[in-house]
Amino acid sequence: MDIFIYFTVVIIIMRVTANLARELLEVLEELREEYFRGERSYPFSEWERRREQVKARLRKLPELVERAVDLLNVEEKRVGRPKALDLEQRVMLFLFARLMDKSNRDVEELLVLFSPLFGFQVSYKTIERLYSDAEVKLALHNLFVLLLQEEGVSGSFSGDGTGYSLSIARHYRSSPEKKGKDYRFVFRVMDIETGLYVAFGYSRHSEMEAFHKAVKMLEKLGIEVDSISLDKYYSSRKVLRIFGREVAVYVIPKKNFSRPGMEWSRVLRKIACSPLDFMKRYFKRNLSEAGFSADKRRFGWKIRQRREDRQETALFAVAVLHNLFTVRVNAT
């Protein structure tokens, strides 16, 4: 504890320098080794109890979809054959198809099996067209917002990006460089209190571009950010400027950074005042990584759609499904 007190005093009476920052990073690394390397018990009984939240959301899903559709004001200007299904049916069918993570032909056959439940059958082409249906996209956006309103948003977030493969031959894990035309990138902001995604960004180029789109979504939805934990990939003054002085950003500087500046000074002062508390909050970003892992196991790691707009819709649907199925338990 003496070293923590020492840094607290030094940070108050001295200007933040690169040398001091490097010393603080050494302290954080020591804390990482001492407190954050070991295995932690997971409260499985609590998780099992909270699974009832998922059942409650699923029971309420038809009502939420109806509300999401009612919020739309669609002008009837269709040309050609009218759609066989109304918008509520199309949204429910889309969510079912995305949840199954099967080919459109497989989903078509599943609809035959579950015809008593759905009450309709459609072709695989109809299912594929749902990914570019403008009305379905708007209803999904409304459903995303309604789920957040139902659960509430705390303002304490974590954020991270990940990639999805377009090819079975190039799995995301087997290609750690995460580059090339065979990947699509997303950035999702997670509420650490509820485990829900509160913003989403998509890019065919980079995680950073997806990050900027997610930040814009936060702004458009009017969601206030009190604090956020980010990976080292987002460790830059440009990122810190985006959030400004009012937001507590928990990110560790890269080892080669040289000029702290005003943006980094605020972060480094927070580290010096309480390194252990800083690290505890910083490692909340692991919730995002755990969420990505769960999403890919449950909803798939490959994008089957070929058109760009349909790829983005497929990935946004993962965020909606995550918010339906997630269970957040405060593990110790």
Image (cartoon, rainbow, N blue to C red):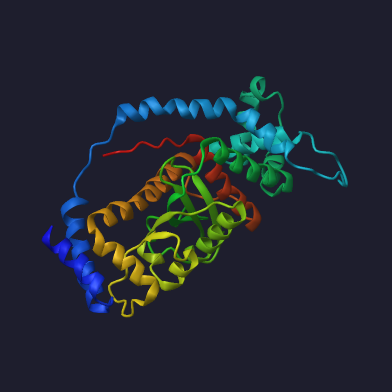
Q: Is residue 51 visible?
A: yes
Q: How many numbered marks does the figure carry? A: 0
Instruction: Give the left or right position of residue 264, taking residue 150 as reference.
Output: left
Rendered position, 65 above or below 247: above
Q: Quadrant for the C terminus, please.
A: top left
Rendered position, 144 above or below 162: above
- Residue 265 quadrant: bottom left
- Residue 239 quadrant: bottom left
From the top left corner, tell me how far across and down residue 208 is, in percent.
48, 65
- Residue 82 quadrant: top right
Instruction: Give the left or right position of residue 117, taking residue 271 as reference.
Output: right
From the top left corner, tell me how far across and down residue 111 is, in percent.
64, 29
From the top left corner, tell me how far across and down residue 317 is, in percent.
57, 44
Q: In terms of depth relative to the viewer, which is nearer, 40 or 105?
A: 40
From the top left corner, tell me how far across and down residue 261 is, in percent.
37, 77
Q: Residue at x 57, y 25 (%)?
A: 59
Q: Residue at x 45, y 37 (%)?
A: 326
Q: Residue at x 47, y 28 (%)?
A: 53
Q: Is residue 182 visible?
A: no
Q: Residue at x 22, y 41 (%)?
A: 40
Q: Quadrant for the N terminus, please.
A: bottom left
Instruction: Give the left or right position of residue 310, taking residue 148 as reference.
Output: right
Rendered position, 128 above or below 7: above
